[in-house]
Image (tube, rainbow, N blue to C red):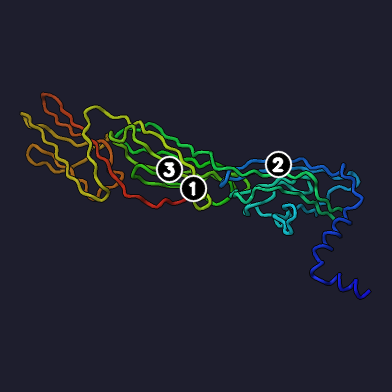
């Protein structure tokens, strides 16, 4: 009897005894009463997320109680990956179904290469402990989905916004979204969905010039601290008005524009920014307009009009404001 006590309390045998007890606890179960409906194979891309649908049955004489627990674990692993009683959709792995409703579906965020494995479901109830026999296998592939880019009509001299949508509707770590190819203002934001999942977007705002026509713009999305990266490049189609003169100004610079009209009798001169009249000093036959500390809103089409009793003359120029690279901000609505 002394030897038996030594075995029972010896830590070397604790794991073996636990497994033996669990096997004895489930002894006598009819496997045909315990069926799990789950895909044999599931594929996910590295950095994205995956939802594995799952449901299970139990014997009719032993319904699932409201206190039943579900566990997902890897075969031959001691520790559970997730437990329904400690479930939290903000974790990397979580249940999307309710065990009392016999729904064992799970969701995995920030999918990694190390997640490629078999997964086994265990049901624990006051009268039941059963390890279901069908094991779904998760296959993790390289990231191949590309971000989507949405752009409207681009007109030289008019401020435009192009939007990039990150692949995946996930609840994991927000991706890093960057733009390459142009100077502009970047603003990242998300659109929330149930279970803390979201789609991430990035807006790129700039004022195109005629020189930007057929140039490239790239949206790059990086997951898992740049271990999984995808990108999408588009060619810009910039429309422009014939006869425009284009001037590029750096943010914060000063620029003086002079409109001179040679006419007889003296013409009335007016400056327009888009369709709005802008004022400036008149010197002889010239009207002066100055930009001080140029900002993005100063970009656009400027028109000078000279008018007298014999008619009207117009001259149009385009002002482009170039921004230095900026750190993007994520805005949650």
Q: What residue did someone put label 2 on?
A: 53
Where in the figure is residue 72, as x and y percent of width and height? 73, 51
Judge depth for marks 2 and 3 and give the one in front: 2
Q: Residue at x 41, y 38 (%)?
A: 162
Q: Quadrant of the N terminus?
A: bottom right
Q: Residues within 10 Å of mark 3 (few under 14, many from 20)?
A: many
Q: Residues within 10 Å of mark 2 (few under 14, many from 20)?
A: some
Q: Nearer the viewer, residue 316 or 310?
A: 316
Residue 135, by quadrant, is top right
**Can you name the residue that lies furthest to the bottom here?**
2
Q: CA distance from mark 1 to mark 2?
A: 27 Å
**Can you name the residue that lies furthest to the top here?**
310
Q: CA distance from mark 3 to mark 1?
A: 16 Å
> SS of the residue at dot 1?
strand
Q: What residue did someone put label 1 on?
A: 222
Where in the figure is residue 73, as x and y percent of width and height? 73, 53
Q: Nearer the viewer, residue 100 or 238?
A: 238
Q: Nearer the viewer, residue 28 or 90?
A: 28
Q: Earlier in the sequence, mark 1 or mark 2?
A: 2
Where in the figure is residue 18, as x and y percent of width and height? 82, 62
Q: Is residue 175 left or right of residue 269?
A: right
Where in the figure is residue 83, as x and y percent of width and height? 73, 55
Q: What residue did someone put label 3 on?
A: 203
Q: Earlier in the sequence, mark 3 or mark 1?
A: 3
């Amino acid at each position: 009897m002394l030897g038996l006590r030594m075995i029972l309390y010896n830590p070397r045998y604790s794991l073996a005894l636990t497994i033996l007890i669990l096997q004895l606890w489930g002894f006598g179960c009819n496997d045909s009463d315990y069926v799990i409906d789950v895909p044999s194979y599931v594929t996910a891309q590295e950095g994205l997320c995956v939802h594995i649908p799952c449901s299970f049955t139990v014997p009719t004489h032993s319904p699932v109680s409201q206190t039943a627990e579900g566990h997902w674990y890897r075969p031959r692993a001691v520790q559970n990956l997730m437990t329904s009683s400690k479930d939290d959709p903000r974790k990397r792995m979580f249940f999307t179904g309710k065990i009392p409703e016999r729904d064992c579906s799970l969701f995995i965020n920030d999918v990694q290469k190390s997640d490629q494995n078999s997964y086994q479901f265990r049901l624990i109830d006051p009268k039941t402990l059963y390890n279901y026999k069908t094991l779904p296998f998760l296959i993790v592939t390289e990231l191949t989905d590309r971000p989507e880019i949405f752009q409207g009509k681009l007109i030289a001299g008019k401020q435009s916004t192009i939007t990039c949508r990150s692949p995946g509707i996930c609840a994991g770590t927000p991706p890093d979204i960057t733009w390459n190819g142009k100077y502009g203002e970047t603003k990242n934001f998300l659109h929330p969905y149930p279970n803390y999942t979201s789609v991430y977007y990035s807006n790129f705002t700039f004022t195109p010039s005629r020189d930007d026509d057929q140039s490239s713009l790239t949206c790059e999305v990086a997951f898992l601290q740049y271990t999984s990266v995808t990108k999408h490049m588009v060619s810009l189609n910039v429309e422009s008005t014939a006869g425009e003169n284009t001037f590029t100004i750096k943010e914060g610079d000063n620029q003086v524009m002079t409109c001179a009209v040679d006419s007889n009798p003296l013409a009335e001169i007016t400056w327009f920014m888009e369709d709005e009249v802008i004022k400036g000093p008149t010197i002889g036959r010239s009207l002066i307009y100055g930009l001080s500390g140029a900002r993005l809103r100063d970009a656009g089409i400027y028109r000078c009009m000279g008018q007298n009793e014999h008619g009207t003359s117009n001259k149009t120029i385009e002002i482009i404001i170039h921004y230095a690279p900026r750190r993007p901000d994520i805005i949650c609505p």
